[in-house]
Amino acid sequence: MLELNKVYCMDALELLKQIPDKSIDLVLTDPPYNVNLDYTEIEDNMKDEDYSEWCYKWLSELYRVLQEGCYAIVFTGDKKLFYVMQGIYKTQFQFHHFLKWNKPLCQRGLPGTVLFCRTELAFVLSKGKPNIKKINRKTLYSDTLTYNNTSNNDKFNAVNHNARRPIPLYRQIIKGFGGNIVLDCFMG
């Protein structure tokens, strides 16, 4: 039996299979983007078709564990956006919009990009008709959230991970979309 408020270091698909149906209020996650980043134990350079199929598998599990009318916020990279979208459209998720993370001081470009990557997108999905009354408009009033990127010197974000997210960014999203039980199956 999985415990709440605990980090599990394991395969996301295996973890998701252990979560009961309709038990999650909000999904906020950041899966690998399949852009050949150096993760210790995760393959981040699948063939595009395999990546799309892998996305479909975990998205299907997210749909199963999410409560009706609740939201899934799934970050994605620009380069493989199409393949994640393919996975989404194979599920019953409703795609509503993109949430955008604006990183004004970011000077990092991924290999093969022309411009600096100062924004990241997150799919805003719902299971069935979304309960828009759950959205806290005082906390989440725009589709663009501005937070500086994290660095190794940040007090609360100094962890050895290629794709750290600022805690205030996640805090605003969680407070904005609400929910008592929040799932991040990829620990972005």
Image (cartoon, helix red, strand yellow):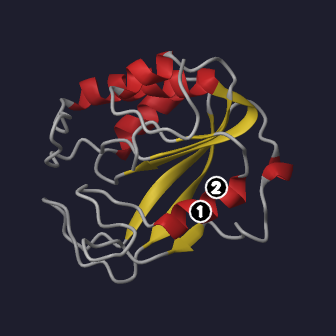
Residue 171 vs residue 75: left or right? right
Residue under the image location 39 percent in, 40 percent down: 186
- Tell me where residue 51 appears, x and y as whole percent: 28, 30
For residue 27, above or below residue 155: above
Q: In which image quadrant can residue 14 be found?
A: top left
- Tell me where residue 7 appears, x and y as whole percent: 43, 39
Q: Nearer the viewer, residue 159 or 92?
A: 159
Quadrant showing the N terminus: top right
Q: Which mark is residue 144?
A: none
Secondary-structure class at tag 1? helix
- Tell me where residue 103 appears, x and y as whole percent: 40, 75
Visible residue check, residue 92: no
Secondary-structure class at tag 2? helix
Residue 174 vs residue 60: left or right? right
Q: Amino acid at mark 1?
A: Arg
- Tell me where residue 101 appears, x and y as whole percent: 48, 67
Q: CA distance from mark 1 to mark 2?
A: 5 Å
The extreme bottom residue here reads: 105
Q: Are marks 1 and 2 in contact (CB under 8 Å)?
A: yes
For residue 10, above or below residue 188: above
Q: Which residue is mark 2?
A: 174
Residue under the image location 34 percent in, 54 percent down: 78
| Label 2 neighbour load within 10 Å: few <14, some 14-19, many 20+ | many
| Label 1 neighbour load within 10 Å: few <14, some 14-19, many 20+ | few
Q: Amino acid at mark 2?
A: Ile
Q: Which residue is mark 1?
A: 171
Residue 176 vs residue 30: left or right? right
